[in-house]
Image: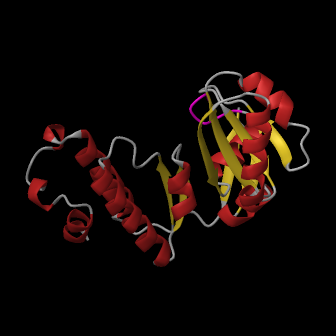
Amino acid sequence: RAARALTTFQLDEYADRKCRTYSGGQRRRGDIALGIIHEPKVVFLDEPTTGLDPQSRAHLWDEVRRLRSDGITIFLTTHYLDEADALCDRISIMDNGRIVAEGTPTELKRAVIGDVVTVGLNGGAVRAAGLLEHRPYVRKVEIPDEGGLRLFVEDGARAIPEILRDLEQAGLRLSSIELHRPSLDDVFLTKTGRSLRES
């Protein structure tokens, strides 16, 4: 088991070194290896990929998937919502110690109906929000801290020409516009009223 854990977490070449000489990422992988070496039925992983480089992070994702496929129940806390989306069967979003949303990733994203259009503006975000919030194609308007607008719409492909026309007629200049399907970040924003960075 020890040999398999060393190989799984890419620690073979460091196996004979004292742990105090390990880098932060090596220590993190060693901690997780120690946590599963006795083949538990349930594993709690608290921010397991914090501080890992992208390659180590991807490798750890693969290992979490393997553990899950072996029938181990894994409780994972993370601030990386892409990680939760990729690894978790069920997700609970917490805000100030309270669960504000719970379900599968698909169910949570489906709860944020429609598309999200992010509009970058050269000033005038408050004026643009006031103009667009009453349009029939817009369900909700947010002004994120970084400026511009975040518009929740039913159909982004149809809404974008309307947005462009309305802002142009009002003399507001766009610097960018993006369309994307709701993500867990959008679910977090909708349920808590702020971005994960702010919290």
Q: Quadrant of the N terminus?
A: bottom left
Q: Residue at x 45, y 70 (%)?
A: 65
**Residue 3 lies in quadrant:** bottom left
**Is residue 198 shown left or right of residue 38?**
right
**134 to 103, vertically: above or below:** above
**Residue 75 lies in quadrant:** bottom right
The answer to whether residue 16 is magenta is: no
Q: Is residue 65 visible?
A: yes
**x and y, in percent, of residue 102 in the image:** 74, 55
123 or 147: nearer the viewer: 123
**x and y, in percent, of residue 24 in the image:** 26, 40
Q: Residue at x 40, y 69 (%)?
A: 39
Q: Residue at x 55, y 56 (%)?
A: 84
**Residue 22 lies in quadrant:** top left
Q: Is residue 93 visible?
A: no
In the image, the segment drawn in magenta is 194-199
**x and y, in percent, of residue 42 in the image:** 52, 63
Q: Main secondary structure of the magenta part?
A: loop
Q: Quadrant of the C terminus?
A: top right
**127 to 89, vertically: above or below:** above
**Is residue 141 shown left or right of residue 8?**
right
**Is residue 56 shown left or right of residue 172?**
left
91 or 160: nearer the viewer: 160
